[in-house]
Image (cartoon, rainbow, N blue to C red):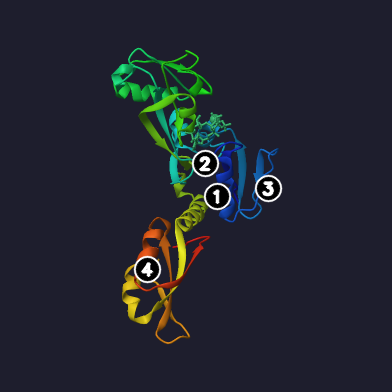
Amino acid sequence: MKTLKIAIQKSGRLNEKSVELLKNCGLNFENYKSSLISPVSNFPLEILFLRDDDIPEYVQDGIADLGIVGENVIQETEVKVSYLQRLGFGKCSLKIAIPNHSDISSLAGLNGKAIATTYPVILKKYLVGHKIESDIRTISGSVEISPGLGLSDAICDLVSTGGTLKSNGLKAFADVMNSEAVLIGREGSENDDLIQELIQRIQSVLRAKETKYVVLNAPKENLKDVLALLPGVKSPSVVPLAEDGWVAVHTVIPERDFWDRISQLKQAGAQGIVVMPIEKIIL
Ligand SMILES: Nc1ncnc2c1ncn2[C@@H]1O[C@H](COP(=O)(O)OP(=O)(O)OP(=O)(O)O)[C@@H](O)[C@H]1O
Ligand SMILES: O=P(O)(O)OC[C@H]1O[C@H](OP(=O)(O)OP(=O)(O)O)[C@H](O)[C@@H]1O
Ligand SMILES: [Mg+2]
């Protein structure tokens, strides 16, 4: 039987979440910082721990079958790969930012200005698309410091909380792209049975993460109102309670609707509401 290889980040922002996702898929492997390749004992898979910049090319060239990496890195390396699944972590935006007291006030104001970045390819495409000619200064890190050092008039870097911009006296000026971690494979690899099985497992974990299992008690006479608030995977289960006139309702609801629904359910007479995490949802 063939063994797949999946490349994930060795250390950094995506490492922990990538390892957690694969472990939640029921894959058993050791996660020693010193080993760069780790076999999975209960699935034909090996995990390669790499610098994130190398992952898209390794997947394109077939050295790894799959990879978990930020969309920003895929776009920057301009590889041809298939996006197999968005993973919902590592969310950030690539933005152009300028010093708080900069006199640049419109995109056109970036003409002839120096912009420091570790994403020259994406930035170039963005500027060409907006018919702006700037001097792109490619550096390898600590981008936010460059305007303060007189190296550039603006920067283009990843932002999530905005804390790094703020502590360096910068403000966001234009959105270049949004990014999150994605599972990638070679073009056409979505047709591989083993890859499909892994995607199904990942989807069942992601689905479960977005949903809660809810059990509550309700007076039978209010059941209709309570059920109207609870769309289940198929339909909620209703179980009679020992106390006459009461039922227990079991269902799953999306986390995003959770607080809204809880207060509406209480208004409809629901009591003893228990909310539990779900490990996997297989449809
Ligand atoms: N502030 C952030 N918030 C959320 N996600 C981020 C943030 N910064 C980066 N990311 C995402 O996490 C990915 C990895 O970020 P990290 O800073 O660990 O990269 P790196 O320093 O290039 O790592 P490596 O050593 O593997 O080359 C980025 O490519 C991006 O997709
Ligand atoms: O908006 P914030 O929440 O402050 O995050 C933004 C920072 O996060 C990233 O760097 P990271 O901390 O990963 O360090 P790195 O530059 O060494 O990769 C990015 O390059 C920014 O500097
Ligand atoms: Mg990197």
Say which residue label 2 marks. Answer: 68
Mark 1 vs mark 2: which is more N-terminal?
Answer: 1
- Whole-Å distance between the Cαs marked 3 and 2? 18 Å
**Disc 1 to disc 4, how far (Cα)?**
32 Å
SS assignment at label 3: loop
Estimate the spatial distance between the alpha carbons at disc 3 and disc 1, rounded to whole Å: 14 Å
Q: Tell me the tag on residue 159.
A: none
Res 30 label? 3
Q: CA distance from mark 4 to mark 2?
A: 39 Å
Q: Residue at 35% of width from left, 65% of height from top? A: 264
The amino acid marked with disc number 4 is Leu
Judge left or right: residue 248 versus residue 140: left
Q: Between disc 1 and disc 4, whose residue precedes?
A: 1
What label does residue 21 carry, if any?
Answer: 1
Q: Secondary structure at mark 4?
A: helix
Tag nearer the camera, 4 or 2: 4
Nearer the N terminus, badge 4 or badge 2? Answer: 2
Please identify, in this view, whether the residue under mark 3 or under mark 4 is nearer the observer.
4
- Tell me if I can see residue 230 in this picture: no
Task: For the residues labelled 3 and 2, say whether their Cβ atoms are less than 8 Å apart.
Answer: no
Q: Earlier in the sequence, mark 3 or mark 1?
A: 1
Which residue sits at x=29%, y=23%?
Answer: 130
How far apart in space, not on screen, are marks 1 and 2 (Cα)?
10 Å
Q: Quadrant of residue 114?
A: top left
Label 2 crowd (10 A; few <14 / some 14-19 / many >=20)? many
Whether pointer 1 and pointer 2 mark residues with C-beta atoms closer than 8 Å, the reply is yes
Q: Nearer the viewer, residue 10 or 244?
A: 244
Residue pointed to by mark 4: 265
